[in-house]
Amino acid sequence: MNIREVGAEFTRREIMPHLDQWEDDGRLPRELHLAAAKQGLLGVGFPEEVGGQGGDLIDTTDLQEGMFEAGASSGLMSALFTHGIALPHIVSTGLATGNTDLVDRFVRPTLAGEMIGSLGVTEPGGGSDVAGIRTTARRDGDHYVINGAKTYITSGTRADFVTTAVRTGEAGAHGLSLIVVEAGTPGFTVDRSLRKMGWHCSDTAELSYVDVRVPAANLVGEENAGFYYIAEQFVVERIALAVHAYGIAGRALELTAQWCRDRETFGKPLIRNQTVQHTLVEMRRQVEVARTYAREVARRHVAGENVIAEACLAKQTACDAATYVVDKAVQLHGGAGYMHGTEVERHYRDARLLPIGGGATEVLADLAAKLLGYTR
């Protein structure tokens, strides 16, 4: 089987029988990470020399598409693959410098399903403005002392470590660093688990750092280079969220088309109505446009092209498609689509976060305008 088929089969076997329960629980079991690692899924897109399976963004896109096609939710994918935003900075700096201490301590166990990592960037006072981070890390001998707070942290309540963005220098982008903070470190606490409109099976935390002493060895790469490390991963994160968007849209479309074939109204299948047919066609058009464009941007990124602006556009295109498609899916399901626990209802809730996460649509449109030369 290819990677898409492996992901789909894993989803049907290990995820779909339990997803409703995990939604109610508000979290995924750690055993799922172990199972995904055993199947070779967690390491896709990570180099073999750090414990990964190899491959690139195209491979991770194929894997995610297969899982979405089989029914995986956006919330589940965010929780199971949070290491996709927690580890890349550690991997890239470790390979570049030859210092593999953090790789050995955090990357390998995470890709083996033995640890869970998360990324701590967003703060109570701001989200998309990464350069405005206020959490501080003051050097004190062989340690950093961290003070501040993070919020909306995906997998934060289950995480064994948080790759945390902190201010170690001057104001603005050039004074930020990344430091790995381990769960259980004195002063580092999960203040609360946050309840959300969607992504119910993806635990989300509010974190507090009060005089947290972390070994200086936990610094990721160079001091004050954190903004660059974070920005370097933005393209991949935004394409991944585009895959989430058109992935759940495609699944919602297939569920809806089947529902319209099976559902009878006024003595005939719902799908026999021309207005329903046209709606399904439009849903399909938007899914295919979003998929084709996002995959092309992914291909260009893998080829080494600068596609920062295009990744913003791909994410917005896919999010717009998802917003339209899941809304029509609920509408065509009628009352059944509005019932909690139905799959299209879950996708409807989950889709609402996607234009916000990874950079709000309005912020990314502003960035794209600057990059494309449309500001003067």
Image (cartoon, grey):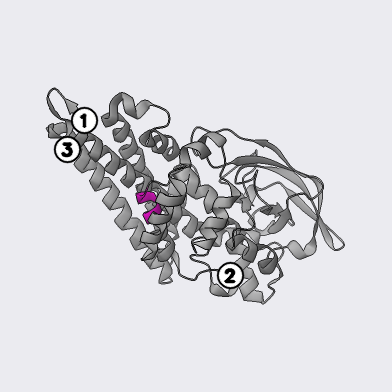
Q: Depth-wise, is mark 2 or mark 3 nearer the camera?
A: 2
Tell me which corner region of the image, top left, top right, bottom left or bottom right, holds residue 182: bottom right
Compared to 361, does 47 lie above or below? below
Residue at point 47% right, 41% down? 19
Residue 66 part of the magenta-drawn span: yes
Kind of residue at badge 3: His
Q: Does dot 2 land on a helix, a strand or a loop?
A: loop
Residue found at the far bottom of this picture: 98
- Residue occupied by mark 3: 278
Residue 171 % position (x, y): 70, 52
Which stretch appears magenta? 65-70
**Residue 271 sits inside the magenta stretch:** no
The kind of residue tagged 1 is: Arg
Q: Position of residue 48 (x, y in %)?
A: 54, 73
Give the numbered dot on residue 167: none
Residue type pointed to by label 2: Gly
Q: Earlier in the sequence, mark 3 or mark 1?
A: 1
Q: Mark 1 points at which residue?
A: 263
Residue that badge 2 annotates: 51
Q: Earlier in the sequence, mark 2 or mark 3?
A: 2
